[in-house]
Image (tube, rainbow, N blue to C red):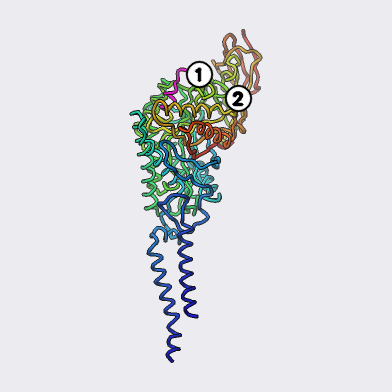
Amino acid sequence: MVGGIMMNKMPHRNLLLVIVSLVIVFSMLSSQEIAIAFQMPGTATPAPVAENIEALEIRNLEQMLDGDDLDEITRKALEEKLNMARTVINERTITAASWSARAESILPPARQYNEKPFPEGVFEGGEGFISSSEAYIHNRWQKTIEDGFIQVFAGFSAKNPLQGVLYIAETSADRMDTKIQAVYPGEQDGGFRIVEADDGVLILESQNMLYCFDVLQRQFVCVVN
Amino acid sequence: MHKKRSVFSLCLIFLFFTLIRAAAADSGTDTKRYLPLVIHIAPTPTPTPVPTPTTIPTPNPELPPQYSTSLYMKTVNPNTLFSLGCEYGEKDQLSAGTQDNVVFLAFGKPTMNDGIYGASLFGFGPASTDEIAEAIKQFGAGYRACLGDDAFSHLRVAVGTSNYGDPELVSWWDHGRKWARMVNDINKYFVDQGYFTWVDAVGASDMELAWNSPSVTRLWVEGYDYANKYPLYNFGAAEGCPTRLAPQWQCASPWTKEDVWYISFGSGASYPMPLIYATNGVNARQWAWLSVYAVEQHGAPMNFKGAFTQFQACQQRGGCDLLDNTPEQGWQQLYDELKFDERTKQHLAWSTDIKWWGE
């Protein structure tokens, strides 16, 4: 009889042991760890790797600021950089703590967006559209065409300043595709500059000559010495 | 029998506890531990910090990080930017491990029309700073939306312009100040919306020595530094500047090493993430030598954020003879050159490669 009672009590004792142990385990974990483990909705979720990069930056800047050889301007600059890195970590912590939105609730903007009209005419510079390692651009002409946009950049080759060059860039109406063609004159008379545009024909000047360039034909149609 | 069960239960509990703590162990710091989201543990080892007087310690050998793709932008369409951000979010979500990248979105040269500041969109603009800010906010929202349940990946968006342009046509100091305010505004939105843990923004400028004078470029940087809460990344080259192999070279006139140092690191806002495109390694040697200059003249090396290449843009448009380092080559060249002098040796966190959007 006594043995039978003991047999019935043992599972309860085990259960109690499990509960007590779980309480101990969970009391040793932070609420954040528990929340993350069970993917609780709206849980703050920090980004450890990014934080490591900022933390390394902070540690690095603090070490640099300990240096004895720093001049005043560098010390001031390093202090500002340190403040910026701390700002980022603080704001990341604030965001993680207060975040409640779910990713699936973030939607694209509802309104339609209309692109502004493409600027037409002759403009100074090349906008960095052509790499500076390739050419120096004096100016450009641009116009909307039936199925997109066309731009002609005038300047000289980065490798040879006497070599004039034109770049014709044709871009699709959705702006996503651009094809570029380079055109060189026969002579090496310095860089081109567009001086006039008339019905698809550009008048270009170099050091000693004038050129007419037909944009559609992609060729020089006159050269005047 | 029952004793065995009790012991077994206890073992199970402690196994559970141990697993939790072990899986939560992060990659080297001693501050935070996370529960078993094992799939998100960083795939690459994080450098173990060893105190040195100057730079971040580096594991040996250090390999190039996964590169990101940066973009030259011809639009500020918020819908397009949301979709674009979503692509980056999906990519990070689908990639194994935790991702941490920087992506530069370059909007062209500074503009000022009727008192409204902005950028040129490479001839397709101009777009005002308000329009650019809205575009980046949507990019960040798209990134976060498509990151899904990836709780740990992070993207830094470097909002880029350049120092290209007429010194007379733009109030450069004021433009820099406006650019900094735009970045502040973008980050405020990210904080308010709860995205900042996953996506944040910094200013950026492609500051090329051939594109403008040091005085104009410094003015812009000073304007940025006047109003900024967040850093400014210089992704330009140091044309003509000397190297350890050619210490007699001069930076493209009228620029000096001091000017390049100031816009890249000497200003409180600035960090270099320079264009390392030359396959012969000259860009890397120039920047490393500038960092040696920084140590010798100012008492501290420059902290580089990483390396910037143009391989994909070259693939798109061609014309990059010997200027088309792959991202891995560019990063390795800069890392090796910085390592050449113990005083400038450092960890390079990021690698990015630019191309034209949509092409």
Q: Residue at x 46, y 22 (%)?
A: B212
Neighbourhood count class around disc 1 (C-alpha, 10 Å): few under 14, some 14–19, many 20 upward: few
Q: Quadrant of the C terminus of chain B?
A: top right
* Residue B38, numbered label: none
Q: Quadrant of residue B336?
A: top right
Circle 1 is placed at which residue position? Answer: B248
Q: Picture coordinates of residue A58 (x, y %)?
A: 39, 41
Instruction: Find residue B74 and report its horizontal and vertical position in percent.
Output: 52, 33
Q: Residues within 10 Å of mark 2 (few under 14, many from 20)?
A: many
Name the amino acid type tagged 1: Gln
SS assignment at label 1: loop
Residue for badge 2:
A168
Residue B257 in the magenta stretch? The answer is yes
Q: Residue at x 43, y 40 (%)?
A: B201
**Chain ID for label 1?**
B
Q: Nearer the viewer, residue A44 or A60?
A: A60
- Residue B80 in sight here: yes
When the figure is inspected, residue B12 is found, relative to residue B298, above or below; the finding is: below
Question: In the picture provided, is A65 more to the left or to the right than B103?
Answer: left
Distance CA(mark 1)–CA(mark 2) = 39 Å
Q: Could one spot residue A108 in this view of the protein?
A: no
Q: Position of residue B249 (x, y in %)?
A: 51, 19
What is the chain identity of the residue bearing mark 2?
A
**Viewer-side residue, A224 vs A88:** A88
Q: Is residue B7 above or below residue B63?
A: below
Bounds of the magenta segment: B252-262
Q: Between B168 and B230, which is closer to the camera in this rendering?
A: B230
Q: Give me the residue at 66% from left, 22% from top.
A: A217
